[in-house]
Image (cartoon, coloured by chain):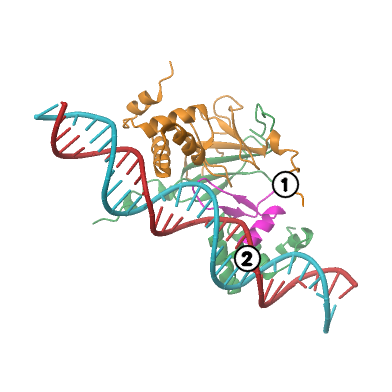
Chain colours: A green, B orange, C red, D cyan
Amino acid sequence: MTPGPRELLGEAGLRITAPRLAVLEWLADHPHATADQVAEGVRRRLGTVSTQAVYDVLNTCSRVKLVRRIEPAGHPARFETRTGDNHHHLVCRRCGRTVDVDCVHGAAPCLEPSDAAGFTVDEAEVTFWGLCGDCQVPRQDEELPA
Amino acid sequence: MTPGPRELLGEAGLRITAPRLAVLEWLADHPHATADQVAEGVRRRLGTVSTQAVYDVLNTCSRVKLVRRIEPAGHPARFETRTGDNHHHLVCRRCGRTVDVDCVHGAAPCLEPSDAAGFTVDEAEVTFWGLCGDCQVPRQDEELPA
DNA sequence: CTCGTTTTCTTGACTCGTTCCAGAAAACGT
DNA sequence: ACGTTTTCTGGAACGAGTCAAGAAAACGAG
């Protein structure tokens, strides 16, 4: 079965702390959350947690690959616990809403650049840009009416 | 032949100003420059130009597709005049150096997500991450020796 | 070519997301 | 239970980029 946050932290050699457990648990239920949203969710569960702690947990867990950080241009970073498979994302230009997209061509579609120009490539990141359902028509509340 | 900056601005319905010409010309010779680098280059040519003007020119020209803005996660935005073809980029995780990568599978390889989830997709952005030649070995100057 | 309108540039304050810092507090190994 | 190590708190700070008000240029009609 899927290991819980406690086990994951242990296996990664990280100490088990309330903020870490809360972040991981909350993130498992709310993928693609921003740091702010994570902080809010965690506080709702633990009472008070510093912004710093949240960033620290997120960064530490990113480093050991327990969470993946995605940074869509022009939007604050978002985090998810689905790691390992190199899936891609569909991001709304307007509200930043993000959804997972499985790799189109199976395993590694565009994973190899034709010419690496002396680079060592270790990841191919694919982002699809567009407008989500809610943002497609909404000239409504674009400007408040006089 | 390739139209010069002056013609491009005209066609786009934008006024022809010294800062704009200088930015476009400089960018044509220095693709993937950051806003700072553009400002520096333009100042070298025109004397004094406000940071604001540079951002304004870059944003305005982005809007009319005269320049493309790329924003690699964790690095300041970079700009290029090669627009229209949806080519991709290879970015150095460490120094941010960016090089163009032509689309591997011809026209639109991964352009269509398998499931759009109600989104209207208008662009597929592919970024290859790695280390450039200069950043692969350089544990040298990582820490200054005592 | 001059004038008036419109767009662009300058200067400087400011925001946002994120990190840095020092000290207090918790977690782990013995 | 204790000391060491790592993590958390609170607050200051940072970099990239934007906002706002007025001065200065560019266009185009007369």
Tell me if mark 2 has few (under 14), some (14-19) or many (20+) residues whose alpha carbon lies within 10 angstroms of its own.
some
Q: Position of residue B68 (x, y in %)?
A: 47, 34
Q: Amino acid at mark 2?
A: Ala
Q: Which residue was labeled with disc 2?
A: A53
Horizontally, is B17 left or right of A18 in the view?
Answer: left
Numbered mark located on residue B142 in the image: 1
- Mark 2 vs mark 1, CA separation in Å: 27 Å
Q: Position of residue A81 (x, y in %)?
A: 65, 55
Give the residue at x 43% y 30%.
B24
Residue A79 belongs to magenta span: yes
Residue B60 is drawn in which quadrant? top left
**Horizontally, is B80 left or right of C3 in the view?**
right
Q: Secondary structure at mark 1?
A: loop
Magenta stretch: give its range.
A55-84
Number of residues whose C-alpha sits closer than 10 Å to that of mark 1, classed few (under 14), some (14–19) or many (20 or more): few
Q: Residue placed farthest to the top in the image?
A: B1
Q: Nearer the viewer, residue B48 or A48?
A: B48
Q: Amino acid at mark 1?
A: Glu
**Image check: C24 left or right of B64?**
right
Q: Is residue C4 above or below residue B27?
A: below
Quarter containing the N terminus of chain A: bottom right
Residue at horizontal 63 percent and vertical 63 percent from the top: A23
Spot occupied by residue B86 in the image (x, y as percentages of width and height): 52, 30
Q: Is residue C18 above or below residue C28?
A: above
Identify the image quadrant of the C terminus of chain A.
bottom left
